[in-house]
Image (cartoon, rainbow, N blue to C red):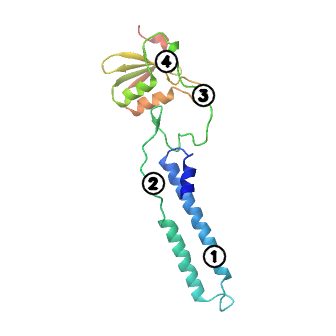
Amino acid sequence: RQQDEAKLKGLPKSDSCIACYWFTMNLSRTFIAITVVVYVHGLAPSSSRWGSGSNRRAFFKTAGAVLGAGAIQQPAMAAQEKEYRQGIEVNAFNGLIFNYRGGDFNGLDANSLNEESISYAEFNEKLKGSEVAFVEFLAPDGDVAYATFKDNKRLRIGEGYPIEQHDGYSSPMFCVRAVKNAGVPYKFVVPALMKS
C-alpha cells in the first residue's frame, strides 16, 4: 500500500485519475489471485480423471471468496481539494496527464505595458470574488483584455495574462473560459471599430 501511495505522488491531483489507478490495481490483484487459485486447484489430487464434485465446489467457493475480497477492498482516500490552473479546475481531461512540455512562457510581462493594469492572478481572485462586471477581449486572438469592475473601474489585464502562442500552451482562451464559467459577460472587439 505504501508503494502504491508513493507511485501516486508523481500523478496529477485528480480524483478520476486516482480512482482509475486504484481500480486498475485492484483488478490486477484480483486477476493474479484467481490465476494462482486455478493453477493450485489444477495441481490438487482428485479421485477421478475429471475431478470430483467436491473439488469443483471448493474451487468455486475459493474463486468467489477471492473475487469478493478483491471487490470489497477499497482504498481509504481523503477528499482532496480542487486544483485550479489559470482559473480552470484541473481534471483528468484537461490536466498535464500526457506530460506536455513547453511551459516556459509565464504570460504577459507588465513592464511592456504603457497603461494601468491588474495582474492576471489578481484578476482571477476578483473574478472568483464576483467583483468583475464585464471583460472585453481585442480581436483576433484576445491578446489584449480589459476588465471592467463593479466599481466602474476599467483596467487592462496585465502581468501573467496568457497571450496566444500558436506553437505552445499559452492562450487567452483560458481567460475566456474562466470568465464564461464565472457567468461574467464578455465580448470580442475589433480594435479599429472601438469607440474612443
Can residue 102 be seen in the rendering of this structure? Answer: yes
Along the viewing direction, whichever of 61 and 6 lies nearer the viewer: 6
Could you tell me if residue 184 is visible in this image?
no
* Location of residue 61 in the rendering, given as x and y in whole percent from the top left corner: 53, 79
Helix or strand or loop: what does disc 4 sit on? loop
Circle 2: residue type: Met
Q: Residue at x 53, y 53 (%)?
A: 5
In the rendered view, would you say 40 is above or below 191?
below
Please tell me whether residue 93 is drawn above or below residue 39 in the rendered image: above
Classify residue 133 as left or right of residue 103.
left
| Residue that mark 3 sits on | 104
The outermost residue toward the bottom is 47
- Within 10 Å of disc 3 (Cα), the crowding (few <14, some 14-19, many 20+) is few
Q: Position of residue 20 (x, y in %)?
A: 53, 53
Give the SS element for disc 3: loop
Location of mark 2 (residue):
77
Q: Nearer the viewer, mark 4 or mark 2?
A: 2
Residue 71 numbered mark, or none:
none
Q: How many angstroms separate mark 1 from mark 3 (CA)? A: 53 Å
**Which secondary structure lies at badge 2?**
loop
Q: Give the residue type at disc 4.
A: Val
Instruction: Measure the alpha-carbon separation of dots 3 and 2.
Output: 33 Å
Where does label 1 land, which residue?
A: 38
Other-residue count near label 2 (Cα within 10 Å), few / some / many at <14 / 14–19 / ≥20: few
Residue type of the residue flagged with mark 1: Val
Quarter where residue 127 is shown:
top left
How far from the left and from the top, in percent, is residue 31? 60, 67
Say which label, 1 or 2, has the lower sequence index: 1
Task: Spot the residue most to the front.
Answer: 2
Number of the label disc, if any, that sits on residue 144: 4
